[in-house]
Image (cartoon, grey):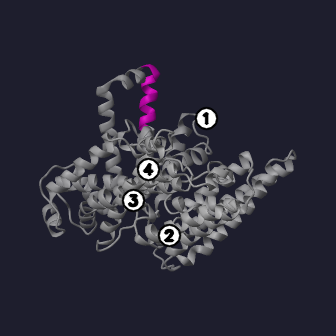
Amino acid sequence: MLFTTAAFICVFLPVTLIGFFAIARFSHARAALWLFVASVFFYGYWMPVFTLLLLASITGNFWVGTRIASLANADDDRKRAQATRWMVFGVAANLTLLGYFKYANFFVDNFNAAVGSSWDIGRVILPIGISFFTFTQIAFLADAWRKGVREYRFVHYGLFVSYFPHLIAGPVLHHAQMMPQFRDAATYRFNSGNFSAGLAIFALGIFKKVVLADGISPYADAIFKAADLGMSPDFAGAWLGALAYTLQLYFDFSGYSDMAIGLSWMLNVRLPFNFNSPYRAINISDFWRRWHMSLSQFLRDYLYIGLGGNRKGVVRRYANLMVTMVLGGLWHGAGWSFVIWGTLHGLYLGINHGFRALCGPGLCARFDRSRLFGASSWLLTMLAVILAWVVFRAETLRGAGRILERMVHPANTGHVHTLLWNAGLSLSVGGLWCVVLGAMACLMPNTNAIGEHLLRRCQSRSGATAYALLIAGASSAAVAFLLLMNITRDSVSAFIYFNF
């Protein structure tokens, strides 16, 4: 079920909200159960066949996690060793499940190509959201082993994993972020300030998706599809396709994240922010602190640091960076393009760290104070990110190669005008889209700041109720208009990260 459809906005969301707060007046436990059941229904609406897979994963990880916590907190070394074995078993089981559904076909196809065999296991269908709910539960098992678990209610754990705003495309959540909120009595009381601010952020997220991301997507699709089919764009067309996808991906995924945060605020639950103006980053490390923040933190805490981080020498540090980013790329999808994308970002991070190590803290501090260096660093970072996005987006490596070749070769030959004309598009209009959306991504206040400001105003003592009503009314009108715009289109586009 998509957040941008009438089924979600007009039926599922109001029924879920009304039911949650109505039941909460009599029982918090039953209200949590209601939200858990609604979240499972939300998942099953799209792929009913995989509902049992989700429930089995939740049940198995809850049992293993509580087992780990009970053993890890013991004074007995033997029991702590048992906890470690349970943790390894739980993580391995999760990765095996993820590996089968996400990578089985990829490995079989590559094995057949390498040895010339015809081994066939059939087409394995990828369950939506499996990467997110698997990583969420791996983090739970690791935290249970390191810190123990204080929350043993199955309904709260099930809700933590299946919570519908984050279930399909994140953010990746931690047990400690969510469980205290499900225990808090304030979560179960309707709050007009939270509701109004959440509705406003939800409306901004729909605007990002329906107007901005879907508005510029035809330009990216026209160029990349043609390149994958064997046609080469000219210099202008290659850059138009690359920039269009760079902006489409940002507004599509950040729009989803905004909607998830807004929906949670309506339910008095705070999700972590997932974006912090990543296209303002002044170096690649800064980019990864701003882009898909929950995944970046997961990879850092549970993979990079687990591999040794920077504690085992310079060579090992760069090797750990590369392994982390390659696996982070492979997490996005079963394809060599994702491996290459992750490798590129591993190289970027290695070069950035190496440059700063060579300069030393004194010279780096001088560079950081220089506006010229900052502007140059930002431009270089964006060029690196855009080039990597081309590999990320293209369906074939040859298609990516055609676009990258034209981006660095300004010869005015190719099929761009024909490609855009056949799709009913204009190069100048596409360029204007890129300029406007680029300015919005780099210069305007981000949704995090807007949301926090609205939340403070809606919860302030002076005129809070009137302000909250005004925001709720304006946001409701905006959501209705955007919904009408979306359902009158020929088709409703899914979010890009649903594929990952």
Residue drawn at (42%, 54%) of the image: 472
Of the image marks 3 and 2, the number of the one nearer the N terminus: 2
> Of discs 1 and 3, which sits in the foreground?
3
Q: Is residue 330 left or right of residue 51?
A: left
| Sequence-earlier tag: 4 or 1 | 1
Identify whether 359 is placed above or below 259.
above
> Alpha-carbon distance for marks 1 and 3?
52 Å
Callout in the foreground (3, 4): 3
The structure residue drawn at horizontal position 19% and vertical position 68%, both measured from the top left corner, is: 423
Quickly name the residue at label 1.
Answer: 311
Range drawn in magenta:
351-362
- Pointer 1 local density, CA inside 10 Å: few below 14, some 14–19, many at least 20: few
- Disc number at residue 476? 3
Sequence order check, earlier mark of 3 and 4: 4
The residue under the point 24% across, 53% down is: 405
Lower position in the chain sequence, tag 1 or tag 3: 1
Q: Tag 3: Cα neighbours inside 10 Å, few (<14), some, or many (≥20)?
A: some
Label 1: element kind: loop
Separation of residues labelled 3 and 2 (CA atoms): 16 Å
456, 339: nearer the viewer: 456
Disc 4 secondary structure class:
helix
Q: Is residue 73 in the magenta section?
A: no
Q: Which residue, given by chain and number where applicable, does mark 4 sit on?
A: 343
For disc 2, the marked residue is 12
Which amino acid is tagged 4? Thr
Nearer the camera: disc 2 or disc 1: 2
Residue 136 appears left or right of 330: right
Q: Mark 4 to mark 1: distance in Å?
A: 22 Å
Query: Is 353 inside the magenta-drawn segment?
Result: yes
Q: Nearer the viewer, residue 480 or 98?
A: 480
Q: Which mark is residue 92?
A: none
